[in-house]
Amino acid sequence: MIENKQELIDLAREQAKVNQFDNTVMNPSLTKLGPCRQSNGKFSYASWTKPYPIPDYYQTYMVDLGEKFKGIKWLPLALPKFKIDNFDEFKEIWEREKIDLAKTNESFDSAEFYGLYITSGCLIDFNLHDLYNNGVMTTSQFSNKTGHIQGRTPIGAFSKKLYKHKIFFDLISKIMFQFPIYSLSNILIVETKKDIVPHREQSWAWKCPTEFRIMLYDENTQPTIYVSDIETGETRYIDLPDDTNSFCWSNGTQVYGIDYHGKTSYQIIVNAMWHSKKLDSLLTASISKYANNLNYTIEL
């Protein structure tokens, strides 16, 4: 466990307080989450076309949901457990195909996760999205290299790999059906390989939950993922009930981190543009089911 964790939590909170609810400073495409459907407070369906402002009506919906659900720090989701039927086959694939999700620049930071994208709504954009900025090419594609890497090495701020396999199809279908997705950016599986330093994702800055995860497998016997309130500094571990393995938290009001105890855990990250009405319905149902089983009191 990180020795100076509280110091790092406080640092992450102070950094998050700057433009705390400003989506224009968020660019998930430059993180492990990318390529994504949004960047810097705009919808970005393809990197070679200019992003366009998020419509006022959508921002109004999400701000209203933020006020309605701002009391949620983290919450189990009232959804059945997600699983992969042939888990042994999954582990074989995982050990063979996983990569370090590492920064591609000269940074000395080592990767915190192994990972794979298992599907991407930005599939066509997957190899190209970092070559363009607001519709303008920033990196020449001329290269003497051949094949699929011609002019495209390295790509992006983080290493990335898309691995599509029929073993994931049912899982992806269930996620698409049950999560409040309007337009999917990516679904990726990650494996924690060290302590995850407290931070905020570069996704959305709404007050309502925007980070959706599934704990696919976890050998730990105690909770390892925690959120810390940006305003109060109160830290809470995400302790899931036995009947669900999906959960959420607010990226606008919380920073998060993960303790690593040398045990294997696989986590699914779902990153999307969220459907406001479906999100409202899912959060309402989840509060009704789990409000009395949390390690804090939801104040609505």
Image (cartoon, rainbow, N blue to C red):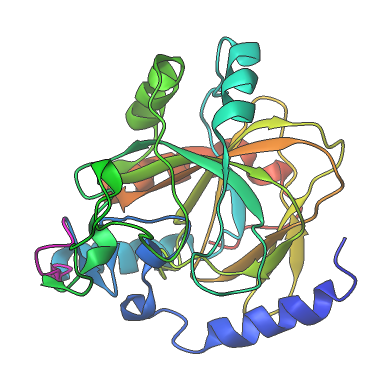
Residue at 72 percent across and 27 percent down: it is 242
Does the magenta-highlighted stretch encompass residue 149?
no
Give above or below for 45 relative to 243: below
Please state if 45 lies on the left or on the right of 224 as rendered: left
Residue interval drawn in magenta? 46-55
Query: Which part of the image, by quadrant, shows the N terminus?
Result: bottom right
- Quarter of the rendering containing residue 112: bottom right
- Residue 36: x percent and y percent? 31, 56
Q: Is residue 214 above or below residue 207?
A: above
Q: Is residue 216 left or right of residue 286?
A: right
Query: In this view of the protein, which residue sits in the foreground, 186 or 274?
Result: 186
Q: Is residue 1 visible?
A: yes
* Residue at the limit of the structure toward the top, as seen here: 86
Place of residue 291 in the rendered image (x, y in percent of width and height, measured from the top left): 64, 45
Q: Nearer the viewer, residue 222 or 258?
A: 258
> Main structural element of the magenta stretch: helix, strand or loop?
loop
Whole-percent x and y of residue 226?
A: 72, 58
Q: Position of residue 66 (x, y in %)?
A: 41, 65
Task: State the residue in front, 102 or 237.
Answer: 102
**As displayed, is residue 38 above or below residue 86?**
below
Name which residue lies at 38% across and 29% down. Answer: 178
Quadrant of residue 203 within the rendered picture: bottom left
Does residue 244 show up? no
Instruction: Please say whether residue 53 is one of the residues in the magenta stretch.
Output: yes
Q: Quadrant of residue 223?
A: top right
Residue located at (22% from left, 50% from top):
125
Residue 196 drawn above or below residue 221: below
Q: How many marks?
A: 0
